[in-house]
Every structure is written in C-alpha cells, then in structure tokens.
Amino acid sequence: MLASADGSQWELITANASWSARSGARLVVFGGKLFLVAGEVGFTPDTQDGDIWTSVDGKDWILLTPTPGWSKRSGHGVVVAGNELLVIAGWNNNKCLHDLWSSTDGRSWSLRSNSTWGCSSDSCGKFDFWSLVANSSLITLGGSSGYSTFGKMNSDTSALPLPLDTAATSM
C-alpha cells in the first residue's frame, strides 16, 4: 500500500498487508476507516474473493468478515452513500451479477435489490463498471455484461435516487 499527500511523492505504507494478493478489489473510506472489499486472484472464473478487510492507517489490516452474506465477486461497485456502504453487482464464477447490498458497519449486509438496472438474470448483469454517488443518486457508467472482459461492453449510464428506501429497489 502506498500513500501520497501530493500525488507526486509516494511512501510505501506496507509491502505485505494481511489480506491475500488480489486484483479487482475495491477500496473506499467509510466511517474513518479504509475498507478493502472482495476481488480476485487472477482472471479465471472461479477465483473471486468475498472477504472484507479494514484499516485505520493502511498498514495494519483486520479481517472484518470472511463471508459478508453476498457471493464472492470482482469488478463490482462499492460506494458510500450517507451512512451506508453499498456493494453493487460484479462478476462471480462466469456470472454477471445484478444485486445491490447495503451495510451500516461493513459486517452485516442486507440485500436491497436483485434486479439492479432492471435486470434479474445473469445475461444482463454487469461488472467492471464505474460507480459513484452524485446529486443524491447512485450512478453507474458503462461496464461489461459479457462472460469475459472481451465480451459485450456497455456505454450506458444509470441513476438510482438516494437514500434507498427500505423496500428492495432497482436502477
């Protein structure tokens, strides 16, 4: 893990973090802590991770949960919306996911939708999209819905108003 105050000079924080080496993970700041969420070990269908790690300094990492309740994944979205951490879709074992999960602590998760983007089948889920929160909405941009990174690429933009209501919702 590296850190920089100016984007020009970088300092190595730790060369060997407690979590396993991975790609496709997502990192966000939530509640004053870093959260490393899921990922993959290589670009093969069945090597996704589903764990969540947290750190206050980027050096010392604690496994928050090895099994958050949602399936292992990579290429997913993770954003902070108010007092909630959201995990959106991604890729798992040759499936394009279409679920949306929320948590107020990073350990306990609730399924908010199983039809993100109005999609309820593996053929229309997405991974490797950009996700962000802006103008009181959860926004996703592009991504892939093919069974490989060389599959169908999307050029769409979707928005879901925030805060999410207590009922399951879709974008």
Image: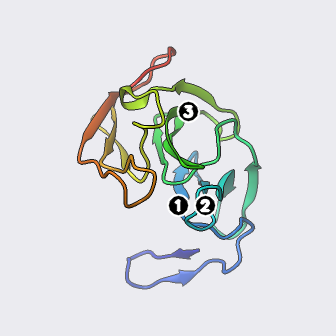
State the residue at coordinates (55%, 49%): 94
Callouts 2 and 3 close, C-beta under 8 Å: no
Labels 3 and 1: the sequence-earlier one: 1
Select label 3 or label 1 by which is in front. 1
Q: Residues within 10 Å of mark 2 (few under 14, many from 20)?
A: many
Q: Which of 103/118 is in front?
A: 118
Quadrant location of the C terminus?
A: top left
Select label 2 or label 3 by which is in front. 2
Tag 3: amino acid: Trp
Looking at the image, residue 165 lies above or below residue 103: above
Tell me how far mark 1 sits from mark 2, CA to CA.
Answer: 6 Å
Q: Which of 147/25 is in front?
A: 147
Tell me how far mark 3 sits from mark 1, CA to CA.
Answer: 18 Å
Q: Residues within 10 Å of mark 3 (few under 14, many from 20)?
A: many
Tag 1: amino acid: Gly
Total labels drawn: 3
Q: Which residue is mark 3?
A: 101
Q: Position of residue 39 (x, y in %)?
A: 59, 57
Q: Which residue is mark 2?
A: 40
Q: Quadrant of residue 19?
A: bottom right
Image mark for residue 24 = 1
State the residue at coordinates (69%, 33%): 108
Tag 2: amino acid: Glu
Quadrant location of the N terminus?
A: bottom right
Q: Position of residue 116 (x, y in %)?
A: 42, 30
Secondary structure beneath dot 1 equals loop
Q: Quadrant of residue 169?
A: top left
> In the displayed image of the protein, which residue is found farthest to the top?
167
Secondary structure beneath dot 2 equals strand
Callouts 1 and 2 close, C-beta under 8 Å: yes
Looking at the image, residue 48 lies above or below residue 113: below
